Image (tube, rainbow, N blue to C red):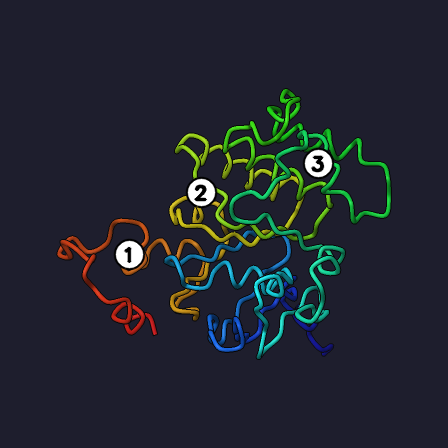
Amino acid sequence: MSQPAIAAKEAKPLLTVNNIEVVYDEVIQVLRGVSLEVPEGEVVTLLGPNGAGKSTTLKAISGLLKTENGEVTRGDVTFMGERIDKKFADEIVRTGIFQVMEGRRIIEDMTALENLKLGAYTRKDSDIKSDIEMVYHYFPRLKERTGLAGYFSGGEQQMLAIGRALMARPKMICLDEPSMGLSPLLVKEVFSIIKEINKEQGITMLLVEQNANYALRAADYGYIMESGKIVLDGTTEQLMDNEDVKEFYLGGGNEERKSFKNLKSYKRRKRWL
């Protein structure tokens, strides 16, 4: 009898963060052994309270720690099988990771078109017309706006920041708080477009977001971070069914818990761990 075919191995993750620790100013430890994986073509979300270390995790991936006197002191970050935590930010962009930073960080005294062209700066080819039209397809308002980007609404600036990322033709986009400062209607629109870009362009995304409801609906998998550690992870369906996640992040949970504002965070970490 012939041997059965060997089952195909699961696809390797596009990005792997392996037990990293991050220290600022040589003394302030922010990340305490963070590990996560981002599979190719999926949306992964990283949730947690302010100060948990979510943005620091993105900066460790994108090579932006050096700008704030931070460094990865332990562990490693690999992308497409290549270690990148020792690379400079511009080198990481060229490998295929582009970060949309918290607060948009667009160039306010440039037009939308000029900002988009800036996003393609690291590309070797000069044919960017089709990519500009692709951005306009997702964000038609940007085509209508001809003035300086500093006069755009918050929603338009966020759209421009995402569009600028697309111009780099990235394999993965890191999004840091895309809903910050936006109206509920615009938040819904931005997350709808994020899901659309992921499905149509196949771009992998790592999403840091305070709005857990929208983040979990947009993502395939999620991690919850507190005090520099991952305390829980799972598919978005699993997380949305978790009583602690419902209570502390989705505004629901056990009806007997009338209030949790005075509870210490270690209590839920103890339950999760």
From the image, tell me which residue sits under label 1: 248
Residue type pointed to by label 2: Met
Label 3, label 2: how many angstroms apart (C-alpha)? 21 Å
Which residue is drawn at the image coordinates 59% and 73% (left, top)?
72
Please state which amino acid type lies under the numbered disc 1.
Answer: Phe
Query: Within the image, what quadrant is residue 188 found in?
Result: top left
State whether residue 264 is above or below residue 137: below
- Count residues near mark 2 (Cα–Cα under 10 Å), then give few for <14, some for 14-19, many for 20+: some
- In the rendering, which numbered label is found on residue 184? none
Image quadrant of residue 49? bottom left
Give coordinates of residue 189: x percent, y percent. Answer: 49, 32
Amino acid at dot 3 = Leu
- Give the mark toward the camera: 2 or 1: 2
Mark carried by residue 180: 2
Q: Which residue is mark 3?
A: 116
Side (left or right) of 79 relative to 217: right
Dot 3 surroundings within 10 Å: few (below 14), some, or many (20 or more)? Answer: many
**Is 220 on the left or on the right of 259, as rendered?**
right
